[in-house]
Amino acid sequence: MKLLQSKHVIPAISFIIAGCTILVLSGILSPVRAADAEKPNIVLIYTDDLGYGDVSCNGATKVQTPNIDRLAAEGLNFTDAHCAAATCTPSRYAMLTGEYAWRMKGTGILPGDAKMAIAPGRTTIPSMLKNAGYTTGVVGKWHLGLGDGSKPIDWNAEVKPGPREIGFDYSFLVPATGDRVPCVYLENYRVVDLDPSDPIQVSYGKKIGDDPTGREHPELLKMKFSHGHDCTIVNGISRIGYMSGGNSARWVDEDMADVLSHKAVTFIDENREKPFFLYFSTHDIHVPRVPNSRFVGKSGCGTRGDAIVQLDWCVGQVLDKLDELGLKDNTLVIFSSDNGPVYDDGYEDGAVEDRNGHDAAGPLRGGKYSRFEGGTRVPMLVRWPGKVEPKTTSDALFSQVDLLASLASLVDEKLDEEAGPDSFDTLDVLLGKSDSGREYLVEQGNGLSLRMGEWKYMPETKGAKINKNTATELGPEGSLFNLKDDIGEKENLIDQQPEIAKKMDGVLKKIQEDGRSR
Ligand code: NG6
Ligand code: CA
């Protein structure tokens, strides 16, 4: 019996020892790779216009975000993480493709009838993860264009190419933004709840149809516009662009957070048995900010604050679903924002007057549209129980443009030479195993700026000091700031340190001229 035992025990022991060695070595030498463990699900919660200081885990005291804070308590909180640009389309383009958007025409803020900004077939986060065996889905704001541009989009037929052609198996979209027509959801290729006898037409040029506009009929509005946003009225709110028809398909803004959260958790539910990637792109807290009545008045900071409370609830829905299905430990959750904060972004919603001292950018200067830090330095939280230390902070310089290469590294997918031309594998930083962030980073706002070590350089641009619509500081002057001493970018050192500025100018030009940085 003893003999018999040892025959089986010895190989078993050596197997355990070998296993331990691999585990120990992998723990010391490299971050977790998919080969070491089962592939984790990946949930990317991507918020809209949420500033660094908008969440209580980053110091907000007036607005409370308990669910978002849960991610910080259970994971890693970045203090110097950046979206690639200070507005939505370029930011999302860069994150999904791993290419700075300023390299590519057609990646500025897009109208709702624009063609796809990302070429079908191109390597993206979802296509890469699909190759690695993931089921991939996007729920929420898209704003990356649809169709191939060969003809105007026909919203009554199949609308494609779209997310599927760049790697998403499933999509449920707000096609552009909440403030742009068409105000309908698109599920895969089709507008949801469309009555064929009431076809949709969309125009970003001349007015079409008989629907009243905000410009002609301000008395019909439940929320007035402050700039732009004076075209077709849908649900009592006038939008950018004109639409007619599709009445049964039009969304109700007050229900949008519920609808999108429901679709997000349904996607998780339906794919719980296999590795999945969910890009949950919330509409909150973009304008029009029209939170559900459950959240109205809940923040004490006006409608913008209430939209943050609603956003926090959406995050809670996703986290609760992961708990309920026992998926928490095997799911990497990444939470971030597509650009910095803005108060009045085109509607009189009280965002400025009712903010009650809440400071959306925290200690940072500028916000949405700006190349000051407030434009792109955004909240970023990473949770993966057992793999990412809870309650930790990273001051590493991190960029969302690196998510493509970093996630590829996580799931052991090799990127082609031409894929993700600006995306570096910084998985160790993403998972909190290393503090050495990017050596340099280009920020895109009203012009470009460059981060290198403690320095931030902004070449002179033509342009305004302040965006007159939003009151966001833009900063057209040539500037050099030392962020170690001056996180608020108050003291311009360009005349004191001309050689540093010159060196950084050269680096920035080279990154631009080279056409790629990886
Ligand atoms: C601007 C809109 C603003 C917002 C932004 C896009 C006006 C005056 N302003 O042009 O309201 O829609 O575009 O925001 O129309 S983003 O977060 O999607 O980039
Ligand atoms: Ca945005």
Image (cartoon, rainbow, N blue to C red):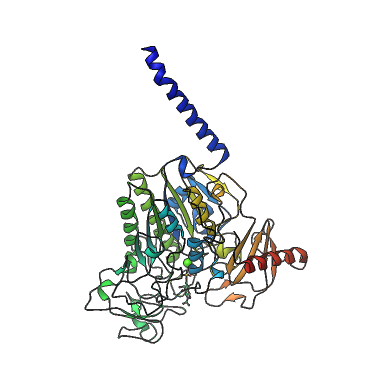
Residue at image location 34% in from the left, 47% down from the top: 274
Residue drawn at point x = 62 percent, y = 75 percent: 465
202 lies above or below 489:
below
Residue 329 percent location from the top left of the image:
41, 42
Q: Which of 185/276 is in front? A: 276
Nearest the eye: 360 or 245: 245
As displayed, is residue 144 above or below residue 487?
below
Q: In which quarter of the image is the N terminus?
A: top left
In the rendered image, residue 212, in percent from the top left (x then y), is placed at: 33, 84
> Picture quarter containing residue 324?
top left
Residue 66: give x, y in percent of width and height.
44, 51
Q: In this view, does 437 lie to the left or right of 18?
A: right
Q: Is residue 35 visible?
A: yes
Q: Which residue lies furthest to the left in this view?
A: 197
Quadrant holding the C terminus: bottom right
Name the side, left or right, on which 169 lies relative to 45.
left
Decide which of 292, 355 is in the foreground and name it: 292
Q: Answer whether residue 50 is visible to the viewer in this image.
A: no
- Total marks shown come to 0
